[in-house]
């Protein structure tokens, strides 16, 4: 990962460690399960803006709100664009011209919490008060928000040495800094399990210290602790990279083809993701690797089979893509088709770190949905889920 670059090209380079990101609408679907609680010894009582009031309203109320937006603004809710603290004209235009509803801060942020808070305020002036701001705040090599007030977050490999209570308490502190800066969604934690035989060769997780280990149960507990701490601070989580990047060798940010020949739909490697869904994860990020034993013909983010696993588990939260803009694994797919394929597969929030691609993705999805009632229904369903997420985080009111 390269640090210190500025402007659009800099965002693309900074985003290259990003992989480190169905049926018609169902108004009667129950809300997501309650978030896990943390014992008083693990964290202090948190003052959150959202986590108790918005969840019961859930998807049904937000379905009506999404329907009132119209197709173009629904599409805007489904694209998340990469930005820096010094907003470029391209980044501003992507938000205003295409009604984008969310942004991801790619760093660097030398001014810390105060500087990022100024950025999030400017973003909401551009996109409206409901605009959701996210960041990759895993720790170690992947900590986008730095500077005064953010502190240093250790890598997941080092976090794994903490007790569950200790990790939850630390994550609450990290989350409070994010919330103070107006960043309310963390594209973390990493729930990928790295089998022992892949430790030396796994580029996207093990070599970068981004994982909690090789034991699915231990990984699951650390994911739960990290998530509980952030929730206590009023920050949502997007566990990643479903169905896991622990059993691959190449990094989808750099390699044009990354193949998993190990993971199955019933694999123990999926345990941390299944547990995260059961415990109330706000979002799940889907990878751009291909899983030969689940869907050999498509990358996970374009696979109804892969996304369908989450829905089979009862997950009604937001399915977010890994980077659709700069990742080498997607070079063969036209930019204007990427968000369309992701949403058609059942995904909800298409992420691109490269603002130059955000407009073409939004326009491509809009054009396809305008001529396809089934895809238009999918767009409306996904928009409702994104609005429900915003409601949980205090950025929107449904019903």
Image (cartoon, rainbow, N blue to C red):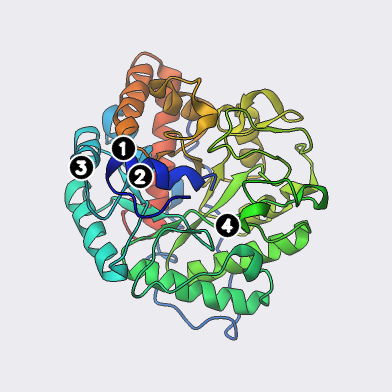
The mark that comes first in sequence, 4 or 1, is 4
The answer to the question of whether label 4 and label 1 lie on touching residues, with beta carbons closer than 8 A, is no
| Residue drawn at the location 65% of the way across and 38% of the way down | 250
Q: Gap in Å between the C-alphas at discs 2 and 4?
A: 35 Å
Query: For residue 52, which numbered disc appears in the image?
Result: none
Q: Which residue is mark 4?
A: 33
The mark that comes first in sequence, 2 or 4, is 2
- Which quadrant of the structure image shows residue 151? bottom left
The mark that comes first in sequence, 3 or 1, is 3
Give coordinates of residue 261: x percent, y percent: 77, 33
Residue furthest right in the image: 197
- At numbered mark 3, what does the secondary structure look like: helix, strand or loop? helix
Front of the two marks 2 and 4: 2
Give coordinates of residue 143: x percent, y percent: 46, 60
Asked if residue 173 lies left or right of residue 68, the reply is right
Q: Gap in Å between the C-alphas at discs 3 and 2?
A: 14 Å
Residue furthest top in the image: 371
Asked if residue 261 lies left or right of residue 240, the reply is right
| Residue drawn at the location 66% of the way across and 37% of the way down | 309
The answer to the question of whether label 1 and label 2 lie on touching residues, with beta carbons closer than 8 A, is yes
Q: Which residue is mark 2?
A: 11
Placement of 259 over or under 171, stated as above or below: above
Query: For residue 92, which numbered disc appears in the image?
Result: 3
Q: Gap in Å between the C-alphas at discs 4 and 1?
A: 34 Å
Q: Gap in Å between the C-alphas at discs 4 and 3?
A: 36 Å
Query: For residue 355, which numbered disc appears in the image?
Result: 1
Front residue of 315/41: it is 41
Say how many tags the image has.
4
The answer to whether residue 191 shows anywhere in this view is no
Give coordinates of residue 129: x percent, y percent: 23, 54
The mark that comes first in sequence, 3 or 2, is 2
- At numbered mark 1, what does the secondary structure look like: helix, strand or loop? helix
């Amino acid at each position: 990962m390269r640090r210190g670059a500025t402007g659009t090209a800099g965002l693309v380079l900074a985003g290259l460690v990003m992989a480190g990101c169905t049926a018609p609408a169902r108004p009667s679907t129950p809300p997501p399960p309650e978030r896990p609680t943390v014992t008083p010894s693990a964290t202090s009582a948190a003052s959150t803006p959202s986590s108790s009031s918005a969840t019961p309203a859930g998807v049904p109320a937000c379905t009506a709100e999404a329907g009132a937006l119209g197709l173009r603004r629904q599409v805007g809710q489904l694209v998340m664009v990469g930005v820096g603290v010094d907003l470029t004209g391209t980044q501003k235009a992507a938000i205003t011209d295409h009604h984008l509803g969310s942004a991801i801060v790619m760093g660097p942020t030398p001014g810390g919490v105060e500087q990022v808070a100024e950025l999030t305020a400017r973003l909401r002036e551009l996109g409206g008060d409901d605009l959701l701001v996210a960041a990759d705040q895993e720790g170690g090599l992947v900590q986008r928000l730095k500077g005064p007030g953010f502190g240093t977050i250790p890598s997941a490999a080092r976090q794994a040495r903490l007790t569950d209570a200790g990790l939850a308490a630390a994550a609450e502190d990290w989350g409070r800094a994010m919330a103070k800066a107006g960043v309310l969604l963390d594209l973390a934690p990493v729930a990928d399990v790295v089998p022992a035989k892949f430790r030396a060769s796994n580029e996207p997780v093990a070599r970068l210290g981004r994982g909690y280990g090789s034991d699915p149960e231990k990984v699951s507990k650390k994911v739960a602790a990290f998530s509980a701490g952030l929730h206590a601070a009023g920050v949502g989580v997007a566990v990643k990279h479903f169905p896991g990047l622990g059993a691959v060798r190449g990094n989808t940010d750099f390699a044009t083809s990354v193949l998993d020949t190990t993971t199955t739909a019933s694999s123990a490697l999926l345990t941390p993701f299944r547990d995260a869904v059961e415990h109330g994860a706000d979002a799940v990020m889907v990878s751009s690797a291909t899983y030969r034993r689940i869907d050999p013909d498509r990358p996970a983010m374009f696979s109804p089979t892969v996304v369908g696993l989450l829905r089979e588990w009862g997950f009604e939260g937001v399915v977010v893509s890994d980077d659709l803009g700069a990742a080498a694994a997607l070079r063969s797919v036209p930019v204007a088709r990427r968000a369309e394929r992701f949403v058609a597969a059942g995904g909800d929030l298409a992420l691109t770190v490269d603002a130059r691609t955000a407009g073409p993705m939004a326009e491509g999805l809009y054009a396809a949905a305008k001529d396809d009632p089934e895809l238009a229904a999918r767009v409306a369903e996904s928009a409702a889920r994104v609005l429900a997420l915003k409601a949980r985080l205090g950025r929107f009111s449904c019903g």
